[in-house]
Image (cartoon, rainbow, N blue to C red):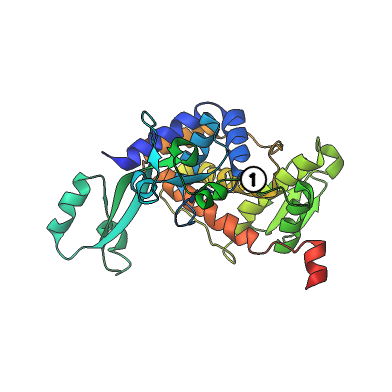
Amino acid sequence: MDVRQVVTDRIIAMLEKGAGVFRERWTRAAARGVPRNGKTGAPYRGANVLLLWEAAIEAGYASNVWLTYRQAQSLGAQVRGGERGVLCAHFERRAREHLDDADDVLSEGGVDEAPLTARSGARAGVLLCRPFWLFNLAQIEGLPLEVVDRGVTSPAASQGPVERAMRLLGGCHATIRHGFDRAAYLPTLDEIRLPWPRQFTSAEALCATALHELVHWTGHPERLNRSFGRRFGDAAYAFEELVAELGSAFLLGHCGLVDATVEGHAAYVDAWLKVLRADRTAIFMAARLAEEAFAYIVAREMPALGEAAMD
């Protein structure tokens, strides 16, 4: 099985539903939290997050907590008959001592890193991508109570979604200027430009649009230094928009802005589909970069008023 291709095909199918559909679904799923393992508590990463979010929304699961079949058995539980798991991707990096060492890995859908490291002088390796399957807590019977409790969504924070978004924006200290005809981030000036607040349809839409541009802002050389070189060519701009799309979905879910829309942005879906169809590794890169941007922004979130007073 070429796991990368299978996962890429599934993401493509999501995007083909249309921007309005996948944005709403991913953001609503994100409001339930990052998917995590019910036994270890560890969060899932990268493209696996998108796959699990989509599966949770499609099936109507109440939680974003998942287990492998064996983990369920180890807890004295059992996946119900007829239930289907969600295929996810696990990456392993192996050292490559000899030229022929990569052959078996490449036959399993792995990537030979020698061409990527030849110029840098770094030691070449092989990146192996293996499949594994996850089941939601709702698909499993006989789970211990403490595991079931992990799947119960905690009550919403006392702070509203708009306030939380403003704390993210304020904590990053990005230069934001209003009074322009459209929203944009200008790397040369390192500033975010937005229309006047009254021009947005709602405060939620203003926050959603500003957070989208804030993801672009993280890519500046003085921050995460996000660049794609010649890999995507003319599609590099569209690929950066895909990173911002995913990053802002993470942020909107984090804030609880589940019904907000990013205003003033053209649809890049066709360009994203072109990139993903040509490169089966692109979605993994985009998801990883989006996660990095999300983590960078959340780490700078201003404390709530009550939390600041307690400090």
Give the amino acid at mark 1. Answer: Gly
In the picture, measured across the screen, residue 31 lies left or right of residue 283, that is right
Crowding at dot 1, Cα within 10 Å, few <14 / some 14-19 / many 20+, comes out as many
Up the image or down, 131 lies above or below 25; here it is: below
Q: Does 101 appear above or below 281?
A: below
| Residue at image coords 62%, 38% | 28
Image location (x, y in percent) of residue 61 = 54, 35
- From the viewer's side, name the closer residue of 87 and 198: 87
Residue at which label 1 appears: 253
In this view, the residue farthest toward the bottom is 311
Q: Secondary structure at mark 1?
A: helix
Q: Is residue 188 visible?
A: yes
Instruction: Give 68 or 256, whichever is nearer the viewer.
Output: 68
Residue 86 seen: no
Location of residue 109 in the rendering, given as x and y in whole percent from the top left corner? 26, 45
Residue 84 in the figure: left or right of residue 180? left
- Residue in the image at 78% along x and 73% along y: 311
Q: Pick the quarter of the image with the N terminus.
A: top left
Q: In the image, 96: left or right of 306?
A: left
* Residue shown at the point (61%, 52%) measured from the top left: 216
- Whole-percent x, y for residue 54 in the image: 51, 35
**Residue 64 place in picture, x, y as percent:** 53, 44
Q: Splitting the image into 4 quarters, where does residue 187 fall?
A: bottom right
Whether residue 52 sits left or right of residue 74 in the image: it is right
Residue extending furthest toward the top: 17
The count of marks equals: 1
